């Protein structure tokens, strides 16, 4: 027999502050973490941050000193006059792209079930995480713009105005991401705008490569920064007010989807499994996209497999656009006076450009059952799935050869490598690294422990992280060090053959 509901008593809805206080008290009652464990975790985070920060700072300072030596040369451009503005635009556009992809206002599935489904003001529940995001954007935006202004102009007024403008721009970026989270159309439009801004920022590089006078230092003048600070501050206040007012109408599914993605990315980052991160982002993208138009394949057997894999790569045109945009990076390195590092930078950037084309090879390498469905041996099957990335590596390397051919070596006077050998070496190195990275197995936590700043980690776990990038670094060393061209040509070919034919 079902008990009746007493409707004589009025329903008391708690305030968001009372609900948060109640949940905080319950968490503290059931928490088994001591203060010493919390301090130990804080210590590891601080040590890791200081070590990585000092290493990165030393590398940037050394490269910047080399860049400054070419200020009076006619064959290169002073990077201090060109890099800060496009770099700042690209950083803020990339940050906005990441915020839109993650949420940015997120909640766990349990929190959304017990809090967002309750008859409590949703705006009050989401207000605290939104303010935390806005505060983070304020601090990081001020730090980024202040650093960029110092690279161009040490004027105190310019630095102060740049800090204010950067803080307002950071708040505006976060508020725009919160506003775009409410609808899928706004989120898609915001993502396209960010992609356009990133491409436009990198488009400045070809302009100064061809000797076009680009007025990139005018933005660092005090008057211009003061005007920009006032305009951006007004926009930040308006966007923040609108975002806070509309927090109460934030769709629950958007908040939960971002929380699920963030928790999954946190687990993948904790295990340092980059393949899992890529798979999750691709799955979320096509889940939001929904149904897609099918295309008819061509050929049969392994030819049909290679054709289908090429069609799958073309379904994501932004990846191809990213590969085209990354072409300017080696030319920019050569143009700003660090030509000795152009081969190494070309190999690393080429790996990043071609790696998205290896999704099919990654899927078939991790699934033995999927491989058994094909009536072919493993080597021909891997070759068919590797065809699109091989074509991509060959075409991308052919476009980059003029930036690395004939450059000075890091330890030798000059490479003296023929263009054909430089092209084969770069393409083979990129393809070997991508194939080895795509074929790596899931992260293994077995084996002996290795002491690291983050604690003791299994040796096999550490080796899996660098599987792929290690071939990129090893294969490009002869070209970067100016060794004889036969060594430059032979080593990448051997690495590529090993990566394709290896059973592991």
Image (spheres, rainbow, N blue to C red):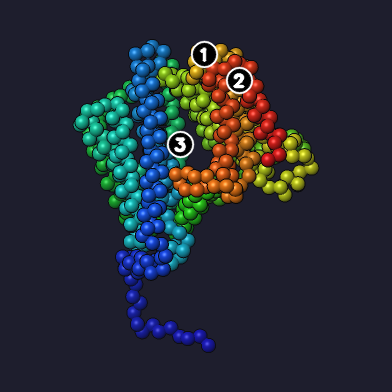
Residue 139 x %, y %: 30, 43
Q: Earlier in the sequence, mark 3 or mark 1?
A: 3
Q: Using the image, determine if residue 297 lies above or below residue 339.
A: below
Mark 2 neighbour density, 10 Å: few (under 14) some (14–19) many (20 or more): many
For marks 3 and 2, give the CA distance.
36 Å
For marks 3 and 1, give the CA distance.
38 Å
Residue 122 x %, y %: 37, 62
Image label count: 3
Residue at the outermost left position: 157
Q: Using the image, determine if residue 128 lies above or below residue 396.
A: below
Q: Which residue is mark 1?
A: 414
Determine the residue positioned at 64% across, 17% down.
486
Task: Please state if 473 lies on the left or on the right of 84 as rendered.
Answer: right
* Residue 19 visible in the current orientation: no
Residue 237 x %, y %: 27, 46
Task: Please state if 442 lies on the left or on the right of 451 as rendered.
Answer: right
Q: Given this view, does label 3 or label 2 mark the residue nearer the observer?
A: 2
Q: Which mark is residue 488?
A: 2
Q: Secondary structure at mark 1?
A: loop
Q: Nearer the viewer, residue 417 or 255?
A: 417
Q: Given this view, does label 3 or label 1 mark the residue nearer the observer?
A: 1
Q: Quadrant of residue 389?
A: top right
Determine the residue positioned at 22% across, 35% down.
160
Q: Secondary structure at mark 2?
A: helix
Say whether marks 2 and 1 touch (CB < 8 Å): no
Q: Nearer the viewer, residue 303 or 47?
A: 47
Determine the residue positioned at 41% across, 43% down.
48
Q: Which mark is residue 195?
A: 3
Determine the residue positioned at 46% across, 19% down.
339
Residue 356 x %, y %: 57, 37
């Amino acid at each position: 027999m079902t008990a009746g509901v007493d409707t004589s008593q009025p329903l008391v809805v708690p305030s968001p502050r009372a609900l948060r206080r109640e949940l905080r008290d319950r968490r503290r009652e059931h928490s088994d973490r001591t203060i010493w464990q919390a301090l130990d975790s804080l210590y590891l985070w601080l040590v890791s941050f200081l070590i990585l920060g000092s290493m990165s700072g030393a590398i940037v300072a050394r490269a910047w000193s080399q860049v400054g030596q070419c200020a009076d040369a006619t064959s290169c451009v002073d990077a201090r006059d060109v890099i800060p503005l496009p770099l700042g635009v690209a950083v803020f556009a990339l940050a906005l792209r990441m915020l839109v992809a993650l949420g940015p206002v997120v909640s766990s599935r349990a929190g959304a079930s017990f809090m967002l489904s309750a008859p409590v003001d949703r705006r009050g529940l989401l207000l605290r995480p939104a303010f935390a995001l806005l505060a983070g954007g304020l601090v990081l935006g001020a730090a980024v713009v202040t650093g960029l202004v110092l690279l161009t102009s040490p004027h105190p007024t310019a630095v102060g105005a740049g800090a204010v403008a950067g803080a307002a721009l950071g708040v505006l970026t976060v508020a725009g991401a919160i506003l775009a989270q409410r609808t899928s159309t706004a989120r898609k439009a915001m993502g396209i705008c960010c992609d356009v801004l990133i491409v436009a920022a990198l488009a400045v590089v070809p302009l100064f490569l061809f000797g076009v006078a680009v007025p990139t230092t005018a933005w660092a003048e005090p008057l211009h920064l003061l005007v920009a600070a006032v305009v951006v501050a007004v926009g930040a206040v308006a966007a923040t007010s609108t975002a806070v007012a509309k927090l109460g109408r934030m769709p629950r599914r958007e908040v939960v989807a971002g929380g699920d993605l963030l928790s999954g990315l946190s687990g993948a980052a904790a295990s340092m499994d980059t393949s899992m991160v890529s798979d999750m982002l691709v799955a979320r993208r096509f889940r939001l996209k929904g149904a897609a138009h099918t295309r008819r394949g061509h050929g049969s057997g392994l030819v049909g497999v290679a054709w289908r894999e090429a069609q799958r790569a073309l379904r994501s045109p932004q990846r191809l656009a990213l590969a085209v945009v990354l072409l300017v990076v080696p030319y920019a390195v050569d143009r700003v006076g660090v030509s000795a590092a152009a081969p190494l930078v070309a190999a690393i950037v080429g790996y990043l450009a071609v790696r998205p084309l290896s999704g099919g090879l990654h899927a078939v390498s991790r699934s033995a059952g999927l491989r058994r469905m094909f009536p072919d041996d493993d080597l021909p099957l891997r070759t068919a799935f590797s065809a699109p990335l091989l074509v991509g590596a060959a075409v991308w390397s052919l476009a980059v050869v003029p930036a690395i051919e004939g450059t000075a070596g890091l330890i030798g006077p000059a490479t003296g490598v023929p263009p054909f050998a430089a092209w084969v070496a770069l393409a083979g190195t990129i393809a070997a690294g991508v194939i080895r990275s795509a074929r790596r197995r899931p992260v293994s936590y077995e084996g002996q422990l290795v002491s690291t700043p983050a604690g003791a980690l299994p040796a096999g776990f550490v080796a899996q992280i660098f599987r792929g990038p290690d071939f990129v670094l090893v294969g490009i060393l002869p070209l970067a060090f100016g060794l004889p061209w036969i060594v430059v040509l032979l080593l990448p070919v051997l690495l590529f053959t090993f990566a394709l034919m290896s059973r592991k």
